[in-house]
Amino acid sequence: MEGNGRKIVVVGAGIAGLCVAVYGLKCGYEVEVLEMHDMAGGLAMSWKRGAYRFETCLHWLMGSKPGGDFHEQWQEVCDIDKLTFVNLDEFVRLETDGDTLRLYTNVERLEAELLRRAPENASAILEFTGAVRALGNFRMLDPAGGLKENWLNMLRDIPVLPLMGKLSKISGAEYGKRFQDPLLRRFFTSGDIGKLTAMAMVFSLGWMNAGNAGYCIGGAQSLIRLIEDKIASLGGKIRFNARVERVLVENDTAVGVELEGGERVMADWVISAADGHTTIFEMLGGKYVDEETRKRYDERELFASYLQVSLGVAKDLSDEPAMLSRILAAPLMVDPGTELDSVTFRIFHYDPTFAPPGKTAVTSTLPTRNFGYWSDLRKMNPGGYHREKQRVAEAVIDVLENRIPGIRDAIEVVDVSTPATVHRYTGNWKGTMEGWLVEPGDGFKPLRNTLPGLERFVMAGQWVMPGGGLPSGPMTAKPAVKWICKQDHVSFDLHTEREAETAAV
């Protein structure tokens, strides 16, 4: 598309920053993305250790099904149809030493399993599976669209709006109380799932049942690579190892950014897709903050941070569930103040790119809100930090050994990341995994993406979309660029670029 002579500088090459770049380029802007790390992705990351690759982000991708809800939004930013998706039979398997609950992704199998286990809860179970069926057909509104673009989806969604209103007002923990089965109750009440609005989990299971929440082979980085390819094809630029220290402001107008080392990158617009707290209180010095923004960062609850123990196992684990949650007889101490009564494993036998034939990548994510402990330990006592990582890894391996005897001897690689690692590579405030929790009563609606008193500056990403996740990239990038186009009297027309691609083919 012919350029319009204006430039956008984007801070951060996570999913949101990359999507901003695509939309901006399609609308004729020159776009330069600045990333502090040596690769794109941010939290959407995987990494190699020896012959193994470990994933820290993608469990499923909403919009994986051609023609399904949100698939078209992914097509706007990349050639998503190049990805290979796997739809797993089980979402998760919960186990004690004497009991097992399988939560299937197919709602018919799920319903049969739950009714078999807890016939006394038949009414609550049927209400739950009915909600899964109903929300699986829900069509999300285009966050950058108006009544004209969204009216048909709004009409289709009218029958499920009362159900959504009901589920949005209660937490997972409250919802789980209706079930007497201890493992089913635990599924809804444990960790951040228990704090989230119940609608979040029902939606996830609904998308899985509809075949619209598959896992893409290669993990999150396979999606990131496709968006990078789109940026390159449109003439965009991503600079790595380019840490932004401050946003340059003249007369309360953003005019560019200054990098570590003093280099200045000037632009007509600045879009921050980086950490929200760092952006507002460090890059902008806390100058453009009203009471609502300050209260949000002072009081609103975040998703927990986490340690991840990653294991390269010289063993074929294809007979095991893809996700296994082991209920512990005695709690596992993660750090001072954090004890877990269950440990969940992701067993990547379904992704052949993560391990050599006959071997399996296994990860375990351990949530904690004790970011300060790990950050301070790494800075003040590197030896103690290393020993603590080893201790946690051994505790996790013990749990897995109890479940699969002899697996310890097959472990070839052990890798441990901590909240300090998350912050070091992504800059994410307190090492949180997805920004703001969606609590009961919140709803899935974006927050304001501008700051009071500051012109020509916009934010995108999980800090303006509670609940985070990969879809928050295009969901916040598109309205950000559309708003910029409106201010500049530039046409926001994505079909021009798509038609040009079709004609070229």
Image: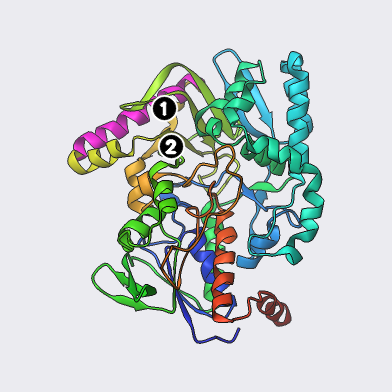
Instruction: Determine the residue positioned at 37% across, 62% down.
Output: 288
Out of 468 and 446, give the one closest to the viewer.
Answer: 446
Q: Which residue type carries mark 2?
A: Leu
The residue beneath circle 1 is 397
Q: Which stretch is magenta?
A: 382-403
Out of 420 and 405, give the one closest to the viewer.
Answer: 420
| Label 2 crowd (10 A; few <14 / some 14-19 / many >=20) | many
Could you say where residue 437 lies in the image, as x and y percent from the top left?
51, 42
Q: In which quarter of the image is residue 471?
A: bottom right
Residue 105 marker: none
Instruction: Determine the residue positioned at 51% across, 34% down.
Output: 192
Instruction: Determine the residue positioned at 39% across, 74% down.
Output: 253
> Marks 1 and 2: in contact by CB < 8 Å?
yes
Out of 291 and 227, give the one closest to the viewer.
Answer: 291
- The prevailing secondary structure element of the residues shown in magenta is helix
The residue beneath circle 2 is 311
**Residue at the limit of the structure toward the front, as seen here:** 291
Query: As displayed, is residue 194 above or below residue 74?
Result: above
- Is tag 2's residue or tag 1's residue first in the polypeptide sequence? 2
| Label 1 crowd (10 A; few <14 / some 14-19 / many >=20) | many
The magenta stretch spans residue 46: no
Q: Quadrant of residue 503?
A: bottom right
Q: Which residue type carries mark 1?
A: Ile
Local secondary structure at mark 2: strand
Local secondary structure at mark 1: helix
Could you say where residue 242 lies in the image, as x and y percent from the top left?
33, 67
Residue 271 visible? The answer is yes
Relative horizontal placement of residue 163, taking residue 354 as reference (left or right): right
Instruction: Determine the residue positioned at 59% across, 39% down.
Output: 441
The magenta stretch spans residue 396: yes
Q: In which quarter of the image is the C terminus?
A: bottom right
